[in-house]
Image (cartoon, helix red, strand yellow):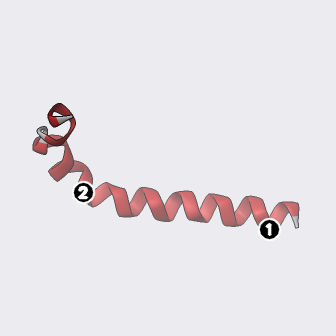
Amino acid sequence: MFTLAKPHNRKSWCSGFTLIELLVVIAIIAILAGMLL
């Protein structure tokens, strides 16, 4: 369990990308929802 919380090098680098990835995923879902509806 501690092995997942230990690597801070990846978390600090990905912390800026998590928000961008979330926005991209939301945008893709919105486009797909718009196409289906």
Residue 27: x %, y % from top left: 60, 65
Q: Amino acid at mark 1?
A: Gly
Residue 16: x %, y % from top left: 26, 60
32 sits to left or right of 1:
right
Q: Is residue 31 above or below residue 8?
A: below
Q: Which residue is mark 1?
A: 34
Residue 33: x %, y % from top left: 77, 64
Numbered circles on residues, count = 2
Q: Which residue is mark 2?
A: 15
Q: Amino acid at mark 2?
A: Ser
Residue at the image position 63 percent from the left and 58 percent from the top: 28
Residue at the image position 55 percent from the left and 57 percent from the top: 25
11 sits to left or right of 6:
right
Cα distance between the residues tagged 2 and 1: 29 Å
Residue at the image position 46 percent from the left and 60 percent from the top: 22
8 sits to left or right of 32:
left
Residue 15: x %, y % from top left: 24, 57
Q: Secondary structure at mark 1?
A: helix
Q: Quadrant of the C terminus?
A: bottom right
Q: Secondary structure at mark 2?
A: helix
User: Given the current orientation, which residue lies at the most extreme right position?
Assistant: 37
Estimate how packed mark 1 is, as few (under 14), some (14 to 19) or many (20 or more) residues with alpha carbons within 10 Å.
few
